[in-house]
Image (cartoon, rainbow, N blue to C red):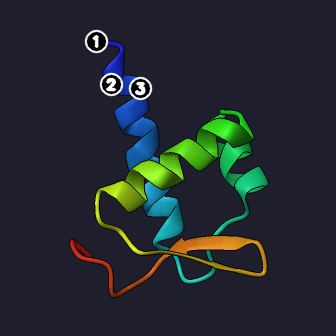
């Protein structure tokens, strides 16, 4: 089951980005133990799934108006 670790990281990312302050890509990559490039891909995956991703001063977060939240 190679998809299970990826799914777990996506869910952790969603939880991280749902906070009120957000996280930088560097912080996301460090906490999830992935590269920055992979962090951007995961963020894009969440966007493709319908989440509204906002960026303010290099801090990325999921907008509270996103569907499913």
Residue 21 point in image, percent of width and height: 63, 80
**Quarter-wise, where is residue 10 in the image?**
top left
Q: Nearer the viewer, residue 15 or 50?
A: 50
Res 1 label: 1
**On the rendered structure, is 1 left or right of 60?**
left
Res 4 label: 2
Q: Secondary structure at mark 2?
A: helix
- Quarter the C terminus occupies: bottom left
Q: Tags 3 and 2 in contact by the CB under 8 Å rule?
A: yes
Residue located 38% across and 85% down the image: 64
Q: Tags 1 and 2 in contact by the CB under 8 Å rule?
A: yes
- In the rendered image, the vertical position of residue 43 relative to residue 52, given as above or below: above
Task: Compute the Cα span from label 1 to label 2.
Answer: 6 Å
Q: Nearer the viewer, residue 12 or 2?
A: 2
Res 5 label: 3
Task: Compute the Cα span from label 3 to label 2.
Answer: 4 Å
**Quarter-wise, where is residue 35 in the image?**
top right
């Amino acid at each position: 089951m190679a998809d299970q670790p990826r799914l777990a990281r996506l869910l952790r990312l969603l939880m991280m980005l749902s906070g009120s302050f957000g996280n930088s890509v560097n912080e996301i990559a460090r906490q999830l133990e992935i590269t920055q490039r992979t962090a951007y891909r995961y963020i894009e995956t969440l966007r493709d799934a319908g989440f509204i991703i906002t960026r303010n001063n290099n801090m990325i977060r999921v907008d509270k108006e996103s569907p499913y939240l």
